[in-house]
Image (cartoon, rainbow, N blue to C red):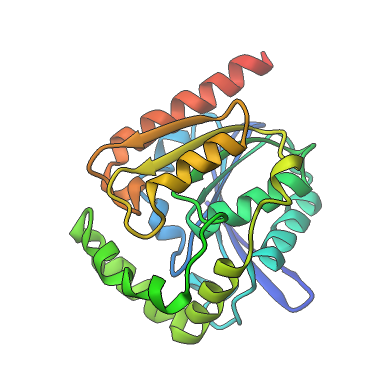
Amino acid sequence: MAATIFQRGGATLHVEQTGTGHRSVIFIHGLSGSRRWWRFNVADLHKDHCVYTLELSGYGRAWRQRALGVRAAATLIAEWIEDAGLEDVTLVGHSMGGHISMHVASRCAERVTGLVLVCASGLLRANAYRAALHLPRAALVGDRRFLPTILRDAALAGPLNLWRNAVDLLKDSVQDSLPGIRARTLIIWGERDVLVPLALGQLLHEALPGSQFEVIPRAGHVVMVDAPRAFNGLLRAFLDRQAEARA
């Protein structure tokens, strides 16, 4: 396991890398998240992929930094991908991380060949105050054993970073980035997601021709934690199809 820090223009990206292989899978957490949110999902991929888990400015180990807006975060990640010379990349983004991933996939269309959008924002339109009212309910839908991690990571990020990012992502739309996405795309949603409604997953599916849309029953917004076996099965099957298509 190797941990590195990528810095550009005063912004910080924490990167943890494990595994081997010429194919890269990059996991990008969402609002209030950290690399810990993927701990049930990365182990199966180490043998045949280089796996990267990112922590964005303002979150996880980068909690001392001011959080970046979604487009600034996408620019930083794109610059890191280009600086590292990564090719044949699959991005896996949850919630705000999926939102960011769509901007990255459009900017790095030659390098990003796979895109997995997990309960992704990007088409969400809501008042920030109204959206905040759903947070307690969203945290209680799904695996409640994960609640301490949610609370710990939210406390690390702090209310100011969370508020800034929430306001920013609710104002930003991915509509201008969608036409530039060439990557094969898998969209995964939790049936009981109350934070980013299931209907938005259907809209993304319709906006991305050829995408695959999968709904995991009884799972909430943090679907990769609520139903890791089902989630991992969908992700592994998608990556295997990616490999077969390039063989």
Q: Residue visible at 50% across and 86% down?
A: 160
Q: Position of residue 17 (x, y in %)?
A: 57, 50
Numbered circles on residues, count: 0
Q: Residue visible at 44% across and 65% down?
A: 33
Residue 115 as seen in the image, left or right of residue 41: right
Along the line of sight, which residue is nearer the eye, 155 or 42?
A: 155
Determine whether 197 is above or below 151 in the image. Answer: above
Q: Residue visible at 35% across and 36% down?
A: 215
Q: Position of residue 2 (x, y in %)?
A: 57, 54
Q: Position of residue 21 (x, y in %)?
A: 62, 31
On-image quarter of the C terminus? top right
Residue 114 as seen in the image, left or right of residue 109: left
Residue 145 as seen in the image, left or right of residue 173: left
Determine whether 1 is above or below 75 in the image. Answer: above
Along the line of sight, which residue is nearer the eye, 210 or 91?
A: 210
Along the line of sight, which residue is nearer the eye, 46 or 55?
A: 55
Question: Residue 134, located in which quarter of the rendered image?
Answer: bottom left
Q: Residue visible at 49% across and 38% down?
A: 187
Q: Position of residue 30 (x, y in %)?
A: 48, 61
